[in-house]
Amino acid sequence: MKAAGGFQKPHGYFKGWYFKQQNGTDTVALIPAFHTDDCGNCSASLQVITNDRVFHVDFPPQAHEASQKELPVRLGKCLFSEQGIGLDVQTQHCILRGVLWFGPLTPPACDIMGPFCCLPMMECRHSVFSLFHQVDGSLSINGREYVFENGTGYLEGDRGVSFPRRYLWTHCAWGRNSIMLSAADVPWGGMCFTGCTGFVYLNGKEYRIATYCGARLLYLSEDTILLRQGDLQLKIQLLKSRAQPLRAPQNGGMIRLIHESAACTVRYTCSKGSRFRIDFVSDQASFESNWEERAAP
């Protein structure tokens, strides 16, 4: 398997992208990835998660092609790029067809990891490629048609060795706005610290939320996060889960089972001084959590 950048990645490595698109009622997330386990076995995969179903497609390593840039990436006859997605998959259990076109992506002002992107030997590095973009086109997933006309898109990715042992992640878009937050235990240099990173993209302006910006996690559980960063306060509560099983990397191999709700009910409450106040409930939020309830440090 040829890794992005044109060279073979060392054993125990993964790289994946998360393409999320939604219309007024449906959410479809596509997760192409390639992986090399700690025994040197290479493989590639595509996971598809909708409001109520999950599909997993395995590809041989030679079916994966990546450019020297982050995108495009090709899996078999499927193409994932900054301009859109083309799907053409037929297996015994899954038939995927369709084309999606993206409007201009909205990249963050700087790397979502901030100065942590420069730290060596990080277990997992998170990226955000588009805070918001328009999606048009249609997908057929096992005979069900998903049509996106002036739909909403979001694009992020992860790379490294393993997903964090404990973490919480959520994303939600409303109108032309979006919010994302990720909190995780981060092992580094023989120590472990709890960090968070994310953003509020509101009325065309990005507000960064992160440990390196002074964010302090006040409370964390499997369904709730509360933090403060200066005059910014944020509370996120999972109200109704629709969690479905996904595969996740552990030492490069896709052997860990996690659960994600691609479209569930979440309440977001956020304010920043007199600049803005947000308080709404969405039933098309995405939420993923593997966190024991405890007071945050």
Image (cartoon, rainbow, N blue to C red):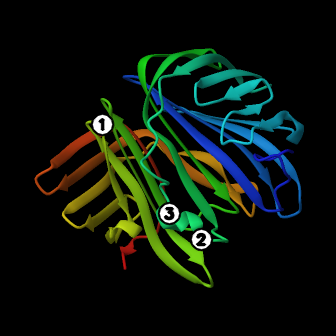
Q: Residue at x 18, y 54 (%)?
A: 271
Q: How many labels sit on residues?
A: 3
First in sequence, mark 2 or 3: give its number.
Answer: 2
The image quarter in which residue 286 lies: top left
Q: Residue at x 26, y 66 (%)?
A: 228
Q: Position of residue 95 (x, y in %)?
A: 71, 21
The image quarter in which residue 218 lies: bottom left
Q: Position of residue 154 (x, y in %)?
A: 47, 36
Q: Position of residue 83 (x, y in %)?
A: 58, 25
Instruction: Mark 3 vs mark 1: give the one in front.
Output: 1
Which residue bears the numbered disc 1? 204
Taking the image as shown, residue 161 lies to the left or right of residue 132, namely right
Q: 82 or 13: nearer the eye?
A: 82
First in sequence, mark 1 or 2: give its number.
Answer: 2
**Residue 119, disc:** 2
Q: Mark 1: few, some, or many residues within 10 Å (few <14, many ≥20)?
A: few
The disc labelled 2 sits on which kind of residue? Answer: Leu
Q: 12 or 245: nearer the eye?
A: 12
The disc labelled 1 sits on which kind of residue? Answer: Gly
Q: 240 or 102: nearer the eye?
A: 102
In the rendered image of this protein, does residue 54 appear above or below residue 166? Answer: above
In the rendered image of this protein, does residue 134 appear above or below residue 5? Answer: above
Q: Residue at x 22, y 67 (%)?
A: 230
In the rendered image of this protein, does residue 231 appear above or below residue 174? Answer: below
The Cα atoms of the two marked residues, 1 and 2, are separated by: 30 Å
Taking the image as shown, residue 200 lies to the left or right of residue 196, namely left
